[in-house]
Image (cartoon, helix red, strand yellow):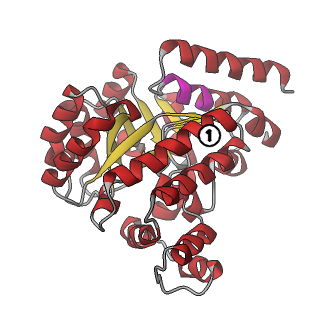
Amino acid sequence: MTDLIQQLPKAELHVHLEGTFEPEHIYQMAQRNSIDLGYESPQAIVEAYDFHDLPSFLSFYYAAMNALQTEQDFYDLTYAYFEKVAAENVVYVEPFFDPQGHTSRGVAFDTVIRGIHRAQLDAEKQLGVQSNLIMCFLRDMSADSALEHLQMALPYKDWIIGVGLDSDEKDNPPSKFAEVFERARAAGFKLTMHCDVNQKDIVEHMHETLDLIAVDRIDHGINSLDDPALIHKIKSLGLGLTVCPVSNHFVVQSYTTSEIRAMLKHGLKVTINSDDPAYFGAYLNDNFRALVNEAAFSSAEIATLVKNAFEVSWLSDAEKTSYLNQVDGCLKTTP
């Protein structure tokens, strides 16, 4: 199974570029930019990690962003992620970035996206990893701020395939951003939203993502199992759900393997992803291995999860078919 997971060509649809910020890179960039984060070494950063829920994780996540200052910083952050996943045979990614986390501390939108985009181009050319970028709004900031950043993104429309919604979900329902997402869809962006595991009012929030926002995909989405009506809606729409097992373990102390298997049995298009791999110590292949190690997921189940990711990606039909053919070819040659 380890060999199969490694050899299968894979797609990742739920990874935050800022969540790929490894401790050694945080330290190096802080040194490079003369930013005092209060840590004497990369190991000291690791020792400070104490995540037990979403808010405790986010507090550190945003603090580390202070080390990112220049276009080269964003290039280095992004390219380092692509190098890691290329070694895992990840061939396609739809990564998130959080511009408000940078503009709010004085870093220009242009600086952020130019660094990321340049790394995307180089990664496709040099590593063979194709990608399409998703811009996320921070749900614990105002809808006006989200709208302002949507306007900032319009000149870079060809560089951004969709918009999402992340950060602290408590008391920040999808309806808060209904106008912003309506304008984003009108501008031609694909839509997705985080519906994180076991958050306050999560079932109501999931209904809003479907009925009010009309998303093209749902990020996380484990709690769809709490309501048969949600299962029916998501299945009938053919929407993908981007589940993150290791991340879930940090938030709810479970890899949610039984829930993932139940989603497969319901015929939902569940996919496996890493979320914030530098902080949770697990890139994409580690998340697949977690399913095998904890719940003995079969090769057929792993193959379905891998195929689902390509099928619900925002690639063209021709590109999807090409990648799916590569998966099938790998399955035929792997014992």
* Residue sitting nearer the eye, 40 or 196: 40
Q: Name which residue lies at 43% across and 67% down.
A: 65
Report the side of 300 relative to 20 (left or right).
right
Q: Mark 1 points at which residue?
A: 123
Q: Does the rendering let one see residue 5?
A: yes
Q: In which quarter of the image is the C terminus?
A: top right
Q: Could you say where residue 209 lies in the image, as x and y percent from the top left?
A: 25, 37
Q: Quadrant of the N terminus?
A: top right
Magenta span: chief secondary structure: helix
Q: Is 185 one of the magenta-colored residues?
A: no
> SS of the residue at dot 1?
helix
Q: Does the rendering let one see residue 212?
A: no
Q: Name which residue lies at 28% across and 36% down.
A: 155
Q: Could you say where residue 224 lies in the image, as x and y percent from the top left?
A: 36, 39
Is 293 situated above or below 66?
A: above
Range shown magenta: 305-311
Q: Could you say where residue 219 lies in the image, as x and y percent from the top left?
A: 40, 42
Is 226 situated above or below 305?
A: below
Q: Name which residue lies at 63% across and 71% down.
A: 24
* Residue sitting nearer the eye, 248 or 20: 20
* Residue sitting nearer the eye, 10 or 71: 71
Q: Is 306 one of the magenta-colored residues?
A: yes
Residue furthest to the right: 335
Is 11 situated above or below 275?
A: above
Amino acid type assigned to the residue bearing label 1 in the image: Ala
Q: Could you say where residue 137 lies in the image, as x and y percent from the top left?
A: 28, 50
Q: Name which residue lies at 74% across and 38% down.
A: 5
Report the side of 237 relative to 21 (left or right).
left
Residues packed near mark 1 inside 10 Å, few (<14), some (14 to 19) or many (20 plus): many
Report the side of 139 relative to 306 (left or right).
left
